[in-house]
Image: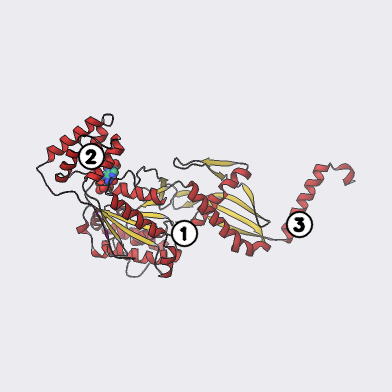
Amino acid sequence: MIKNYVPLEAKKAIKRFGKRFFSFLLLPYVYIMVDEYESGLLNEPYESVQTYLSPKCYALANTLKVTKANNSSSYTFSMDSNQKITDHFNGAPLYWTFHTAKKNSGNRTYEDRYFELTFCKKHREMVSKFYIPHVMAEASLLAMRNRAMRLYTNRATDPGGRIWSPVLFLHPSTFDTLAIDSSMKTRIKNDLMRFVNRKEYYKTVGRAWKRGYLLYGPPGTGKTSLIAAIANYLNFDIYDLELRSVMSNTKLRKLLTSTSSKSIIVVEDIDCSLNSLNRENKAKAKAEEEEEEEEDEEEIEGERGDNMSLVSLSGVLNFVDGLWSSCGGERLMIFTTNHKERLDPALLRPGRMDLHIHLSYCGFEAFKVLAKNYVRLEDHPLMEKVGKALRDVEVTPAEVAEWFMGCKEDPDLAMETLLNELLKRQGGDTEGPQVGVEENAAMD
Ligand SMILES: Nc1ncnc2c1ncn2[C@@H]1O[C@H](COP(=O)(O)OP(=O)(O)OP(=O)(O)O)[C@@H](O)[C@H]1O
């Protein structure tokens, strides 16, 4: 009867359903959840899975979301909620589903996002030994190819309850546009390359794969521009750590341990942050600390109730180094200050700040880089006079850049304006321009 009356397509569908139903009963499945956040910290495997699935989503999913970072050459596709795609590896089907769920924390509602991987029990070993490492390796290759860098900050309260708020990082500064001495550029670039290529070395000596830079010098000499140039050179994300918004050691530890590998953690104007922190209302800090202690069981004795201070910053960094050394990713920590002499030796020691980079007033070489970038000038009859004046006058690259911006359509006028400004200032402080890189004898 069935053969005679049921159409061929329906028969096929029934057969398919029957096969699936029985295989479901006889071959139980394993489910792996990959959450976006784990105890408030960004879960790195989530990002890797998202990257890995992006090209597959485009080919396989029915409903897609598309995003494109301005500095990325490619589009990123992601599945909509409850969509499922099937991946194949070593002949085994692996099912990925994307889920979202609304959750409440206190009086805040946020969206919980996670991927679910489903596979047949018999592939359990193959998945853990080969498939997961394959996903991670593919994801890091894809990420390197299409990477849109991000700038994270802890300044504003994140609507999603995240401790770091991300935005796209689009700073145009590069080592080519930086107006600093060329020998200094080479020295920094070499140091960075040596650092990123030394994974095995850091592992062998049992230290966190981390390097610390201190950038110091007057305002407007390029400290922020250098950080952006380093991020663009290494293709690293930036975590802009605003210490004034961190009211307890527990919070600071959480922030630092939730940074991802291949990142730069920046603490700008460290002397100002720490001074004003020490003046903060202690009661406020203590109240927040107590609130967090209820949530966070892993508090360390001896640090309770401390307001943030220079010493506790150093202590927290020591603690975090221990965790970083076991998780293996590379991190660069950059501190900036206009007053190096005000910093505590506990922060300046090697291992904490391995390279001290002095950015100072505009020298002739730096000036030529600015002239080339801002008014397309490689040579000019006034160049020599400007060079001479720069030896006697303290002027920051930021000021030179401003003067050039004021007359960028007319290079002759730009040079005249600049020379006039320099001559006006002559006769003041006559200390010449200096720049320098000082190795803090850490990992050599
Ligand atoms: N060395 C430099 N090379 C190229 N541009 C520079 C340099 N220094 C300053 N500038 C220009 O001046 C502006 C301000 O510089 P930047 O913010 O990097 O200085 P800073 O030393 O970080 O200052 P602050 O200490 O006030 O934060 C930048 O937008 C950049 O255009």
Q: Is residue 186 above or below residue 27?
A: above
Q: Picture quarter containing residue 319?
A: bottom left
Ligand 1 position by quadrant: top left
Tag 3 residue: 22
| Dominant SS in magenta | loop
As shown in the figure, which amino acid type bears the numbered disc 1? Ser
Residue at 63%, 65% in the rendered image: 125
Residue 314 in which image quadrant: bottom left
Image coords of residue 271 (percent x, y): 24, 56
Q: Give residue 80's position: percent from left, percent from top.
A: 57, 44
Residue that label 2 marks: 400
C-alpha separation, residue under disc 1 versus residue under disc 3: 38 Å
**Residue 297 in view (yes/no):** no
**Mark 2 to mark 1: distance in Å?**
48 Å
Task: Indicate the secondary structure of the residue bearing disc 2.
Answer: helix
Mark 2 closeness class: few <14, some 14–19, many ≥20 residues within 10 Å: many
In the image shown, does 305 or 66 lie closer to the viewer?
66
